[in-house]
Image (cartoon, coloured by chain):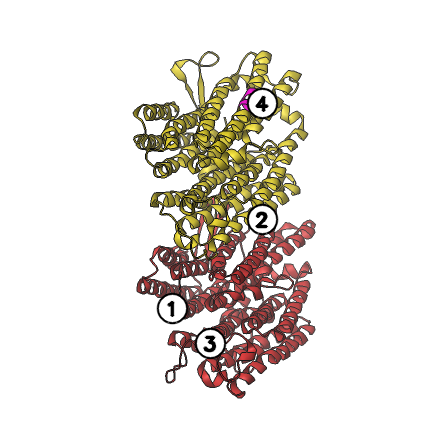
């Protein structure tokens, strides 16, 4: 059992974050170095962890907080799926944020909380029991709030308040479920194939109530309808924060929480025997359709993307709720795929806003000619969301559909198709405007002039291009060793021990 | 053990004699020594697993004065010294040279702390009365030393409440002495049975009401907001963090000590404090949400947070409830001290004691605001903080006994606290009106607020030792 690596993963963003808080505003170089050093160090550590875990090594550490209550971390295959996604995307988001906030006020505060936020995400991914999970889950709420209200405008405050109301109430529900479970079981350690089955049939009623509380608690961050109201409002935050909320940390933490609760607290087979999976699948399906449907009517680009997130994250939940290894793989792989696709879209949206002052879909006419590279990246992300061939989205959708068939829930396939159509209906008009409509007379507010091939600042341009390439790579090289898909298969194999996978 | 009482008396007297200026250093030196003594005592009690006794002058009960420290007293002593030491550092930088309130502060604070330490160590009911009076009078003096008409009015109201409270308590002690011929807790405890005479019930009732009045449990809280909200920041912090805890400690001590057989005979009795505690949480939070003035908001939050302490009474059938209570006392002690001293910084900087005046402070006073946020985290019971552990323990104990409504109260209280804490934070994040300027504030003030807040949070990562200590019963 290796103890220091999980702690080092936490420290690689916590320590730089704490130092950054104390830096004077003007020390840009030091701050940037610290940020990048932390992000790169974390990535290296994660690679070491990945190599170790795939070789069967175990990483974990625990501290007693109260008698019988431990703060415990472990780096297992499932946690690493989330960690590696966050670590990679954090690096890009850091680059992007440095470019995006150049010259803006309060950067020390921003990057300090930014690092805390990633630390909390790492803690969520590595938590070895619900108690630890909850600690970092709430820490994530607290560290993202200052980022959401960063601009200090009335609108930002309103968005931030809504965010808090939802997440704090959700956290209360989650806490209730966790303490209840701890009271019944005496512990809340995660384990493959679950821990609550040991309690016996007379507890079925209580366990259903607890499941409801836990899922409601994490469902708020996962933006399950009807708990999704905060997400579209939180899009007032600066673009790197939106990327963080939608792809790296917050929404993902919710979805990841659902995965942990279903697989490692209840155990997917026990959850099925309690008839909990079908209602969850129905909620996911409703969310998928409702999110896509609402996205159709948003003229604000970021708001449209936000509703798209509401819909897409529930693909993960749907995959989890489809009983059987194929659905599991589909859900888990989408955890990664949705992250890289959505972050591309938000980076691009940020670029349009920063470069040309475009905030609305109706202002996007001809943006593709002025910013071809950004628009290319945007197009790849959007096509991925629709599930177009050769993109990461196609892989997710294929596994999810197979999972639905295998689970005998063919209606879920219709949900997926319906959602793809709606996705096309709200993304294709954007692409059409950007590529084929003539340029408007003047851009709303042009901040950054074009210089040669550089349509905007290079720190803003590179991150979306890289993540767009990753979207393609994850689609085309899905069967390659080390791809998200292969990793998801490894996890599914461990969850359904007796099943051999194709 | 005796030095925990003598040392503060000593530096208080020296501070009075030597005049202002030296008081600060005497206090910081004395408190450092006391902190060491308190930890040493806690170490002895915790490691030995038994209560420690000391017979002053070699005379035992019933003739002499007995001092005794079990886990509960040792924990309260540690809390007292650990909160008082940073507050002394803070007060040293807070009072300007030549300020009258500053000159009075050191001797009075010394007597206050001596009284608190003696209260936690005393093993007989009458000595406890003496210490209660010492604490009460020193506290009133501290409030009145603010000097303004409002402060004097608040101090008079406080004086009335505290004298009435200790008067009722003394009446109870007299009745007990009449009935059993002793005031020593250790002698008295085995004598009391569930068939105790009615006199004992009346005595217990009088003492309970008197102490609840001093703890400012709803509806006896009327004196607290003006006194705590009107006093200078270091005084508010001392009163809110420590003084109200002393009378709570005493209720708890008597409840699980001499009066335990009576309480066991009438189970419904425990619901009285719990129901009042619930109302305190709801009412206090509601008033805090509505408060215009920053320090009033914090004072009403104290009313609410004290309510949690009284929720443990129906759960006192096991040691775990005492642990929950002590954890809440620690959480609130550090966090509330942190909040009041942070408020002191804001008031010094903005020149006004209003929530609205905080706009823009996030840029100028980030450390203080961070301290406010961390303390607020503890009050809301968000992890990782000692407030979270307190809530966890409370909820789990309540679930264990099957009291679902207590769980709901605790959870609702956390959400209400979030409303008033974030009301302040939100205001601080708003952009300041263009023409505001903030006065410079000594760095010491900002950092002491931060230290207190950080302790309240970090304690949430390691509560094992404290819980073991509290497990050692007299």
Question: Which residue corresponds to mark 1?
Answer: A102
Image location (x, y in percent) of residue A275: 69, 60
Camera-side residue of A120 and B43: A120
Task: Point out which mark residue B207 bears.
Answer: 4
Question: Which residue corresponds to mark 3?
Answer: A445
Q: CA distance from mark 4 to mark 1?
A: 65 Å
Q: Is residue A138 above or below residue B292?
A: below
Q: Chain of mark 2?
A: B
Are tags 3 and 1 found on a single chain? yes
Do tag 2 and tag 1 residues touch (Cβ < 8 Å)? no
Q: Chain of mark 4?
A: B
Q: Is residue A52 above or below residue A293?
A: above
- Nearest-to-viewer mark from 3 and 2: 3
Image location (x, y in percent) of residue B284: 58, 40
Dot 2: element:
helix
Image location (x, y in percent) of residue B386: 48, 43
């Amino acid at each position: 059992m290796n103890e220091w690596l999980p702690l080092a993963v936490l420290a690689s963003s916590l320590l730089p974050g704490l130092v950054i808080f104390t830096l004077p505003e003007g020390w840009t170089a030091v701050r940037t170095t610290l940020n990048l050093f932390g992000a790169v160090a974390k990535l290296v550590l994660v690679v070491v962890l990945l190599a170790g875990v795939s070789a069967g090594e175990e990483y974990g550490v625990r501290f007693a907080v109260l008698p019988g209550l431990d703060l415990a971390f472990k780096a297992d295959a499932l946690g690493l799926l989330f960690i590696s996604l966050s670590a990679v995307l954090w690096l890009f988001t850091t680059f992007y944020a440095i470019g995006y906030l150049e010259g803006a006020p309060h950067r020390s505060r921003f990057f300090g909380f930014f690092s805390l936020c990633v630390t909390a995400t790492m803690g969520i991914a590595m938590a070895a029991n619900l108690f630890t999970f909850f600690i970092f889950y709430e820490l994530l709420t607290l560290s993202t709030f200052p980022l959401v209200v960063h601009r200090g405008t009335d609108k930002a405050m309103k968005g931030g308040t809504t965010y808090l109301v939802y997440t704090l109430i959700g956290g209360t529900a989650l806490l209730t479920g966790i303490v209840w479970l701890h009271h019944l079981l005496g512990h809340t350690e995660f384990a493959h194939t679950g821990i609550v089955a040991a309690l016996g049939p007379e507890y079925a009623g209580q366990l259903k109530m607890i499941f409801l509380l836990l899922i409601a608690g994490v469902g708020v961050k996962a933006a399950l309808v009807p708990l999704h109201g905060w997400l579209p409002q939180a899009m007032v935050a600066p673009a790197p924060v939106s990327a963080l909320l939608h792809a790296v940390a917050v929404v993902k933490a919710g979805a990841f929480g659902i995965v942990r609760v279903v697989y490692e607290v209840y155990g997917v087979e026990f959850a099925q025997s309690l008839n909990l999976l079908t209602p969850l699948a129905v909620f996911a399906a409703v969310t998928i359709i409702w999110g896509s449907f609402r996205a159709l009517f948003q003229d604000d680009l970021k708001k449209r993307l936000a509703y798209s997130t509401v819909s897409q994250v529930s693909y993960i939940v749907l995959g989890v709720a489809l009983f059987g290894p194929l659905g599991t793989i589909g859900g888990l792989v989408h955890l990664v795929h949705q992250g890289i696709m959505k972050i591309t879209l938000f980076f691009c949206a940020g670029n349009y806003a920063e470069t040309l002052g475009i905030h609305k879909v109706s202002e996007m006419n001809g943006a593709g000619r002025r910013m071809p590279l950004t628009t290319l990246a945007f197009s790849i992300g959007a096509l991925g969301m629709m599930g177009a061939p050769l993109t990461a989205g196609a892989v997710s959708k294929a596994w999810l559909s197979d999972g639905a068939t295998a689970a005998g829930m063919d209606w879920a396939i219709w949900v997926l198709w319906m959602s793809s159509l709606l996705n096309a209906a709200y993304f294709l008009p954007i692409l059409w405007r950007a590529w084929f409509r003539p340029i408007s007379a003047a851009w709303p507010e042009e901040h950054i002039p074009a210089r040669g091939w550089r349509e905007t600042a290079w720190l803003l341009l590179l991150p979306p291009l890289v993540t767009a390439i990753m979207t393609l790579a994850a689609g085309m090289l899905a069967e390659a060793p080390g791809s998200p898909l292969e990793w998801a298969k490894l996890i599914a194999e461990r969850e359904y021990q007796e099943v051999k996978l194709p | 053990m005796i030095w925990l009482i003598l040392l503060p008396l000593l530096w208080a007297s020296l501070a009075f004699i030597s005049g202002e200026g030296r008081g600060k250093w005497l206090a910081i030196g004395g408190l450092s020594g006391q902190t060491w003594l308190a930890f040493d005592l806690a170490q002895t009690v915790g490691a030995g697993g038994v209560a420690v006794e000391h017979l002053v002058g070699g005379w035992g009960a019933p003739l002499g004065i007995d001092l005794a420290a079990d886990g509960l007293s040792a924990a309260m002593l540690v809390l007292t010294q650990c909160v008082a030491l940073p507050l002394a550092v803070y007060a040293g930088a807070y009072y300007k040279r030549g300020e009258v309130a500053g000159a009075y502060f050191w001797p009075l604070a010394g007597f206050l702390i001596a009284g608190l330490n003696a209260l936690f160590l005393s093993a007989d009911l009458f000595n406890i009365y003496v210490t209660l009076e010492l604490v009460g009078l020193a506290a009133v003096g501290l409030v009145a030393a603010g000097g303004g008409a409002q402060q004097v009015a608040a101090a008079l109201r406080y004086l009335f409440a505290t004298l009435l409270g200790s008067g009722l308590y003394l009446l109870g002690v007299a009745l007990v002495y009449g009935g059993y011929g002793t005031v020593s807790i250790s002698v008295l405890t085995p004598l009391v049975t569930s068939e105790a005479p009615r006199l004992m019930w009346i005595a217990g009732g009088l003492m309970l009401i008197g102490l609840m009045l001093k703890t400012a449990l709803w509806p006896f809280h009327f004196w607290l907001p003006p006194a705590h909200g009107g006093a200078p920041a270091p005084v508010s912090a001392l009163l809110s963090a420590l003084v109200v805890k002393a009378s709570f400690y005493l209720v708890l001590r008597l409840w699980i000590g001499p009066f335990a057989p009576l309480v066991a005979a009438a189970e419904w009795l425990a619901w009285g404090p719990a129901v009042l505690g619930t109302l305190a949480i709801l009412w206090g939070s509601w008033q805090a949400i509505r408060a215009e003035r920053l320090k009033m908001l914090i004072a009403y939050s104290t009313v609410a947070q004290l309510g949690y302490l009284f929720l443990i009474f129906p759960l006192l059938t096991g040691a775990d409830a005492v642990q929950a209570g002590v954890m809440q006392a620690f959480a609130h002690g550090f966090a509330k001290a942190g909040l009041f001293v942070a408020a002191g910084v804001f008031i010094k900087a903005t020149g006004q004691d209003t929530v609205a005046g905080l706009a823009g402070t996030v840029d100028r006073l980030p450390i203080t605001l961070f301290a406010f946020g961390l303390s607020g985290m503890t009050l809301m019971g968000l992890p990782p903080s000692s407030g979270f552990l307190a809530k966890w323990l409370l909820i789990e104990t309540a679930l264990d006994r099957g009291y679902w409504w207590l769980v709901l109260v605790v959870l609702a209280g956390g959400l209400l606290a979030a409303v008033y804490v974030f009301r302040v934070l939100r205001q601080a994040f708003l952009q300041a009106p263009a023409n505001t300027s903030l006065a410079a504030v000594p760095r010491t003030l900002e950092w002491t607020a931060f230290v207190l807040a950080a302790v309240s949070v970090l304690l949430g990562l390691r509560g094992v030792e404290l819980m073991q200590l509290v497990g050692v019963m007299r």
